[in-house]
Image (spheres, rainbow, N blue to C red):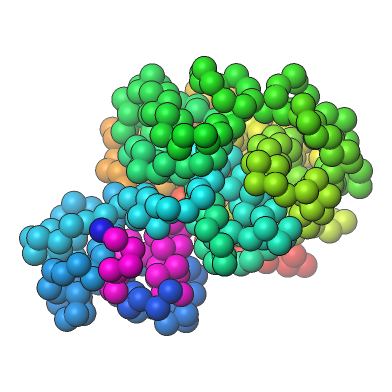
Amino acid sequence: MELSNIQRVYLIGIGGIGMSGLARYFHHSGRVVCGYDKTPTDLTTELHNEGIRIVFDDRQDLIPLNFRTTDEGTLIIYTPAIPKDSAILNFFKNKGFELFKRSQVLGIISKGMFTVAVAGTHGKTTTSTMVAHILKDSGKDCSAFLGGISSNYQSNVLYGKNDIVVVEADEYDRSFLTLYPDVAIITSMDADHLDIYGDHAHLTESFKLFASQIKPGGTLIHRKGLPLETGFTYAVEDTADAYASNIQIKKGDFYFDFKNSKTTIADIKLGIAGMHNIENAVAAIEAALILEVSPNAIKSALGSFKGVKRRFEYIVKNENHIYIDDYAHHPEELKACIRSIKKLYPDKKLTAIFQPHLYTRTRDFADGFAEALDLADELIILDIYPARELPIEGVNADMILSRMKMLNKRKCGKQETIELVKSEKPALLLTVGAGDIDQMVQPLKIALQDV
């Protein structure tokens, strides 16, 4: 399908972070955009307010008439998270429509553009958002399709006036193999999505395939230590082609020096916290230098970078209480998040509230979750958020609890957790997980501040 032929776009699962970005892009470019999702959220409300029609009942009679006949002007996009028995999904299948995944559509949009694609089992959303912000803030400009809401722009899609596009490349379901980037960043290749890949070796193979699809003359940037034979390496406090050193915390802010064989940028203030985010910044700086952004402009942009919603996001930050919300849902992400918090606030007791995401991920990484969560001082664990999965017998949140060494741990329901926070008023609070735990953020904020 050619981008210029598309006149109408229907998105099945429009409320997802990646899907909503495509909805905004096509709506902004003048196409007729409609969609379906299971439940209303803040994001679907925003899309509705922007003029995009959304239905929440899975009924084919709710599909607009102008989407019911197949022609070159109609694009149907779906997310693999949609159940296979969906009435709307099967209407389009039975009518003979060609259905596209988000990643395939990103391939159509980015075709013929200078593409920076950021992949990784974790770190990709923050890194791609950093790259996009540096390009925007410096005046270089770009379009961007992000896997989270940028706190600088309050959106997950950015519109540029040139042919540079930054995309978050998703490894789930091998989706990123539809992209052919000029610059590719790979932040991590930890075992994940084993329900799709079966084992870590097959996941690694997919990342290598993604790296092999870089256009001739393009550049691969990857974190040092990944099993990739070629490319430009980056690291934190370690020798690599590009690295961060002289890392300091001054008044709660992180500072570091960047160095590669050609460029040194000293005393960079990073607008967000965390050692893992310094690592992400090193990759973003290298990509920006390839795009000929000046060192001074890069330094200025990183100082004004506000991060991504639900990525080490401060919800409350005052003398009495610190409350951070994070999307981490893999053991390595949890470790990086908790260690960063402990480094920032070594004298405070950390209470973590964690919602496991997926039965398969809980089953595959129960030991890793237990080890990561033991880094906190106190844990409240919620039931597993199933997302696209059916329950697996014997797999539950207690699998993690039973493996933990921490004594101060318990499983609670959501309302019970809010009441606990209201009564105990922890000085340092973290909510973490990729399910619907984000719906607890505002009630927990109120509970902390309620006197």
Residue 101, x across and y down, in percent: 30, 52
**Which quarter of the rendered picture does the N terminus lie within?**
bottom left
Residue 187, x across and y down, in percent: 57, 34
Residue at 46%, 50% in the rendered image: 435
Q: Is residue 327 left or right of residue 263?
A: left
Residue at 73%, 58% in the rendered image: 138
**Which quarter of the rendered picture does the C terminus lie within?**
bottom right
Residue at 87%, 56% in the rendered image: 319
16 part of magenta stretch: yes
> Is the residue 244 above or below the residue 419 in the image?
above
Q: Nearer the viewer, residue 318 or 275?
A: 275
> Is the residue 173 above or below the residue 416 in the image?
above
Residue 140, x across and y down, in percent: 67, 58
> Is the residue 397 above or below the residue 155 in the image?
above
Q: Nearer the viewer, residue 370 or 16?
A: 16
Could you say which quadrant of the image residue 4 lies in?
Answer: bottom left
Residue at 65%, 46% in the rendered image: 291
Q: Is residue 311 left or right of residue 321?
A: left
Question: In the rendered picture of this protein, how many numbered marks are placed on residues?
Answer: 0
Q: Which portion, as a residue range, is magenta?
A: 2-28
Q: Is residue 237 visible?
A: yes
Could you say which quadrant of the image residue 8 lies in?
Answer: bottom left
Spot the residue most to the right: 250
Q: Is residue 212 left or right of residue 338?
A: left
134 part of magenta stretch: no
